[in-house]
Amino acid sequence: MKRALLVGYGDIAQRTARLLIESGWQVTGICRHPDKKPTMPGIQVLAADAGNEADLRRLGLAQFDAIVITLTPSGYDREGYHHGYVIPCRHIQMILASEPQQESGPPRIIYISSTGVYAERNGEWITEEMPTLPDTDSGEMLLQAEQVIQSAAASVSILRCSGIYGPGRIYLQRQISSGEAVINPVYNNRIHADDVAGFIHYLLLHPEHQEPVYLVSDDEPVWQETLYLRYAEQLGVDGSTLKRSDTVGPRGNKRINNALMRSTGYALRYPNTLVNSEQ
């Protein structure tokens, strides 16, 4: 039976865990407060801090067939992203370099990152081959964490996800309902949480697909005004009252090309945000 370790046990990890259990994997998740997480049959959730090397070393990382890393910042400044992403990746990289490997080889690492490592502002189409030149503290720390984990003694795939949506992810809807949302002249790129988990699961079941980086986004970038007005209609908000700006804003303006992800044979459950949007 193959064994998977989920470093970070939030929404995406929990969705992935369900899929792996259904496929016959043995799954262990770690987080700081497992008592606050939902219990699922067949899934062991342990108390461990990804930022604590001793906690990670006790797990025997090299003995897992797969390690799925889904991290969060400890704060929304440069230091918070460094502590939440870079430090855990450095610990994992160092531990794997020092532990004996299984006879079957090193673990497969799936590391969840963000399209925030790209800073384009003119609606450019983004592919995996384009240079990463982040212009924000968060983007710089996310890229630094990627570079650290890519040097680990393992087969590593970075999944750069666009804006994740789905049940429970209601920040945008709250912004629209409260009147705080601002419509910028930009494209939004979105991916449903089920498809992030689904693609992680797919890659682990199809080890022939081991590209170093995949862009994870749905098929159609959507003009931000179109998306916000759709949500406003669903929420019963008059879209004409939403604030508008003629500037691009801090998140830039880009369109994510998901061709490499689609070339693996993975079929998106939610290929179009406007058609399949969920609150």
Image: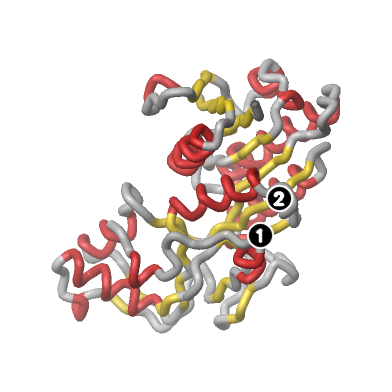
**Residue 189 in the figure: left or right of residue 155:** left
Q: Residue at x 54, y 48 (%)?
A: 77
- For disc 1, the marked residue is 214
Q: Residue at x 61, y 30 (%)?
A: 5
Task: Give the amino acid at mark 2.
Answer: Ser
Query: Is residue 250 visible in the rendered structure shown here?
Result: no
| Marks 1,2: beta carbons within 8 A | yes
The C terminus sits in image quarter: bottom left
The N terminus sits in image quarter: top right
Give the image quarter of residue 62: top right
Pointer 1 or 2: first along the chain:
2
Secondary structure of residue under mark 2: strand
- For disc 2, the marked residue is 157
How many residues crowd mark 2 within 10 Å: few (<14), some (14–19), many (20+)? many
Q: CA distance from mark 1 to mark 2?
A: 7 Å
Query: Is residue 39 visible in the rendered structure shown here?
Result: yes
Secondary structure of residue under mark 1: strand
Give the image quarter of residue 259: bottom right
Q: Nearer the viewer, residue 136 or 218?
A: 218
Q: Residue at x 69, y 46 (%)?
A: 145
How many residues crowd mark 1 within 10 Å: few (<14), some (14–19), many (20+)? many
Rendering coords of residue 238 (x, y %): 16, 75
Give the image quarter of residue 277: bottom left
Q: Is residue 152 above or below residue 273?
A: above
Rendering coords of residue 90 (x, y %): 74, 36
Task: Give the amino acid at mark 1.
Answer: Tyr
Q: Is residue 33 above or below residue 177?
A: above
Query: Which label was assigned to residue 165?
Result: none
Rendering coords of residue 17 (x, y %): 50, 35
Q: Is residue 89 above or below residue 132?
A: above
Rendering coords of residue 117 (x, y %): 63, 61
